[in-house]
Amino acid sequence: MFHHLILCAPIDHALLLLQAQLLLISVLLFTNPSHGSSEEWLLIDCGTRTSYTDGDGLRWQTDVGFISTGENNTNCYTINTPEKVKYLIRAGFYYGNYDGLSRPPTFDLVIDANKWVTVNTSSPEPVLHEIVYATKGDNFLVCLARTRPEEVPFISSLEVVPLATGMYSKMNRNYAWYLSHRVRFGGSDVVSPTKDDYNREWNPYQDPSLVSVAANFSSIFGYCADDPPLPVILNAAEPTAGDASNAISLSFEFPANSSRTNYVALYFTEVIQRDDGETREFVASVDGKEYGLEVSPEYQICSEVNVTTEPAAGDMKIELTAVSGSSLPPLICAAEIYTVGETLLAGSNEDDVNGVEEMKKSFSRLQAWTGDPCLPNNTVWEWLGCNANDPPRVRAIYLSGYGLEAGIPNFGQMQALEIM
Ligand SMILES: *[C@@H]1O[C@H](CO)[C@@H](O)[C@H](O)[C@H]1NC(C)=O
Ligand SMILES: *[C@@H]1O[C@H](CO)[C@@H](O)[C@H](O)[C@H]1NC(C)=O
Ligand SMILES: *[C@@H]1O[C@H](CO)[C@@H](O)[C@H](O)[C@H]1NC(C)=O
Ligand SMILES: *[C@@H]1O[C@H](CO)[C@@H](O)[C@H](O)[C@H]1NC(C)=O
Ligand SMILES: *[C@@H]1O[C@H](CO)[C@@H](O)[C@H](O)[C@H]1NC(C)=O
Ligand SMILES: CC(=O)N[C@H]1CO[C@H](CO)[C@@H](O)[C@@H]1O
């Protein structure tokens, strides 16, 4: 029973400078990507009234042109896309008391007909939510849904980056995949999104039982399918010298009572030219399961193992264990872990969507309603009732209170309609 609306909120400029890449909106270019390039991104910054190019040469603009106009002027963002491309999408929220009310709102973030996440903006830090999403058609919508009557949703940033064909190919396209962890091991600094062809941020994984080893080369000859950036690959971590176990044990935090299925990608390179007779071979296991992930990294080549894991609960344990006979311990450069969401809903019945679009054309008072009319089912348009079919159908139209005088248009194709 709540309205989808969007407010591109200004963000604190000092924080913007510190967190530029996190807080800016980028929406991409609608060409079919083969190599990641920031030139394929269209960048929108909620804190700006005019376009500009930043110090990294990235072009930023306002959200004008991406929002549908309505009673509240801004509703959903419509992102035009080529069909069947996967996107990395990151939404950022920084309240910073921009409205002077000291009332950080909680609301739903929605992508097409699907709930993405409930956003709680009470943190003093920017809140970021990131997914890999495969578009179904020639555009997709990102909407903010008001779920608490007194709280007005806003967004600070929305970054949409096309992924190259073949990236994350084990991620089933019928699901959204939520970023849970993305780490690099061989260094203590963050590798910023501007260093990554796909706008990914790589945070250091700190563990006293690991020691960093820098590669003695500065370029690689073989790339990984999921294409981590060079600074991440040129540094690895090994067990601290003297550790006899020849193993690396990693732990990644997850809610204790969650049931999670993850896509896990691990990245490696051999950082030294091994002497004759030296070997480095190890196996990776996730939550104690081996999945046949065997690694023998090669000098100056990125290698990757990846797996969609069986459901598990609580923290994730990843173990890298040297095979017997390996003269060198395991090493690792980086890891990404994405958690699968619910099956994506296709959207409400198409005839009904077309029917309500016709009604919106006839009644300007209805034009503020955007997004899917019946989905998610806690954000059904206020003047509609929907059934629980899959896909849902419009069951009722409640126009009293809207002061509508024009003739009712023909929406005879809305066959589930019982109440007007
Ligand atoms: C938002 O998060 C804050 C801090 O964790 C919490 O106190 C508050 O109850 C949350 N709001 C909602 C609506 O869940
Ligand atoms: C996943 O790992 C396999 C090897 O196990 C590799 O062939 C593939 O390119 C990797 N990447 C993707 C995106 O599947
Ligand atoms: C997990 O725990 C949280 C807090 O203890 C609770 O609110 C939530 O309902 C639990 N979820 C499940 C699936 O049990
Ligand atoms: C890297 O180390 C190997 C020996 O492990 C050496 O042969 C090679 O010249 C070094 N490369 C550079 C660029 O220093
Ligand atoms: C709303 O959708 C959720 C799944 O997203 C489902 O579990 C729930 O039963 C639905 N509620 C109604 C009233 O259809
Ligand atoms: C259609 C709709 O939700 N309109 C809202 C626009 O914003 C004003 C002020 O926040 C609300 O009072 C309207 O209800």
Image (cartoon, helix red, strand yellow):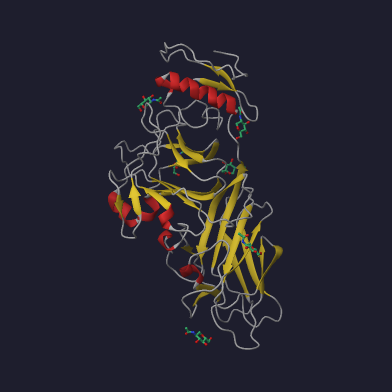
Query: Taking 272 as reference, is 83 above or below it?
Result: above
Q: Quadrant of ligand 2?
A: bottom right
Q: Position of residue 403 (x, y in %)?
A: 40, 13
Q: Position of residue 145 (x, y in %)?
A: 46, 33
In depth, the one of 76 and 280 nearer the eye is 76
Number of callouts in the render? Answer: 0
Residue drawn at the location 52% of the way across and 46% of the way down? 82
Judge left or right: residue 126 versus residue 315: left
Judge left or right: residue 13 versus residue 113: left
Residue drawn at the location 53% of the way across and 52% of the way down? 179
Q: Position of residue 290 (x, y in %)?
A: 71, 64
Of all residues shown, which one is farthest toward the bottom? 276
In depth, the one of 84 and 18 nearer the eye is 84
Dividing the picture into quadrants, the one containing residue 83 is top right
Q: Position of residue 160 (x, y in %)?
A: 46, 49
- Specify the quadrant that holds the C terminus: top right
Dividing the picture into quadrants, the one containing residue 335 is bottom right
Query: Taking 208 as reference, is 54 above or below it?
Result: above
Query: Does the image show residue 382?
Result: no
Query: Does the image show residue 288?
Result: yes
Query: Taking 397 as reference, is 339 above or below it?
Result: below
